[in-house]
Image (cartoon, helix red, strand yellow):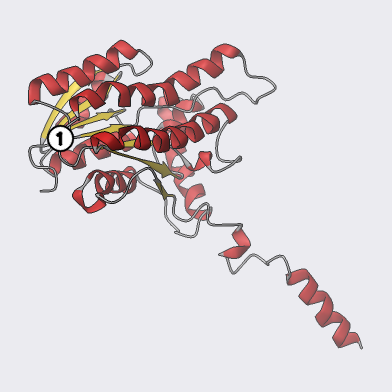
Amino acid sequence: MRFHNKTVVVTGAASGIGRATAILFAAEGAKVYAADIDEAGLAATAAESNGEVHTVRCDVTVCEDIKALMDRAAAETGGIDAVFNNAGAGGDMAKIDEIEPEGWDRTMHLLLRSVAFGIRYAVPHMIGRAGAAIVNTSSVAAVGPGYSPNAYAVAKAGVLHLTKTSAADLARHQIRVNAVQPGFINTNIFTTSLDVPPELEAQAKGAIAMMSQAAQPVARGGQPRDIAEAVLYLCSEAASFVNGTSIIVDGGLTIGPRHSWDPEVPDLFEALRQMKAAAEAAG
């Protein structure tokens, strides 16, 4: 087992990517501290796991909660080996010319400040731990517009830069810091952000899965396990030479315009080719 007897903290572990990652870490032998504000969801995560999962209620917008989480994990096990700063939601949906300061700040606190202080309060318990690693959840939205609301995209771009600067800061402690950038993953982040009623959630997730598999070269919907596998790799010995960077896990969504990979879509020069062929045929 890659993480036998290692202590791992996962935030946002009540559902989706966080749940899948906590369960996979536990299956690989880790002592997992699964944190979220959704206590019922945390209980379901622990019940689904066949390993050691300790559930902790934690609101990552409250720095005192983050510190208490890290302190508890370290106090009960002797230290922390890996942290997955993952908790989040869609944030404020407003465009830049409509968003209010409260919505902007709420989004930044949830998606960016929480990661900064997840690192801040974990590091004292990680110094001296061989192979210590931190992974932060960014997004394909950090690549450019069109994948999310404005505030979310800015926060996730901030997570990428925070990851790089933190890797530099923590090099003296031999703590690696990397990020993962999910594409369209079939979790409840979309249905929650759009306030989809519970009775329509399964139907909405099905529609999202159908849409996503048609939007990228890999013709299937992304699943939480896809991201979990990348996170465990980044925290493992196999990634010991990987630091200050990110892995995009998006089924090829961001590789280029659709015509670059879909043979059914004409490329930019197809119209010119057809024009030339028509002229030659007429001549």
Q: Quadrant of residue 177?
A: top left
Residue 196 in sight from this viewpoint? no
Spot the residue most to the right: 283
Which is nearer the eye, 219 or 87?
A: 87
Residue 204 relative to residue 35: left or right: right
Q: Residues within 10 Å of mark 1 (few under 14, many from 20)?
A: some
For the C terminus, the quadrant is bottom right
Picture layout, residue 151 above or below residue 62: below
Residue 82 relative to residue 203: left or right: left
For the point 11% across and 38% down, which residue is it?
A: 50
| Amino acid type, label 1 | Arg
Horizontal and vertical percent position of residue 275: 83, 75
Which is nearer the eye, 139 or 70?
A: 70
* Residue pointed to by mark 1: 129
Q: Quadrant of residue 264?
A: bottom right
Residue 283 in sight from this viewpoint? yes
Spot the residue most to the front: 172
Horizontal and vertical percent position of residue 2: 14, 48
User: How many numbered badges does the structure rendering display?
Assistant: 1
Picture layout, residue 246 above or below residue 79: below
Residue 143 relative to residue 110: left or right: right
For the point 10% across and 48% down, which residue is it?
A: 1
For the point 33% across and 16% down, which residue is it?
A: 59
Residue 182 relative to residue 97: left or right: left
Horizontal and vertical percent position of residue 118: 31, 24
Horizontal and vertical percent position of residue 40: 24, 21
Q: Secondary structure at mark 1?
A: loop
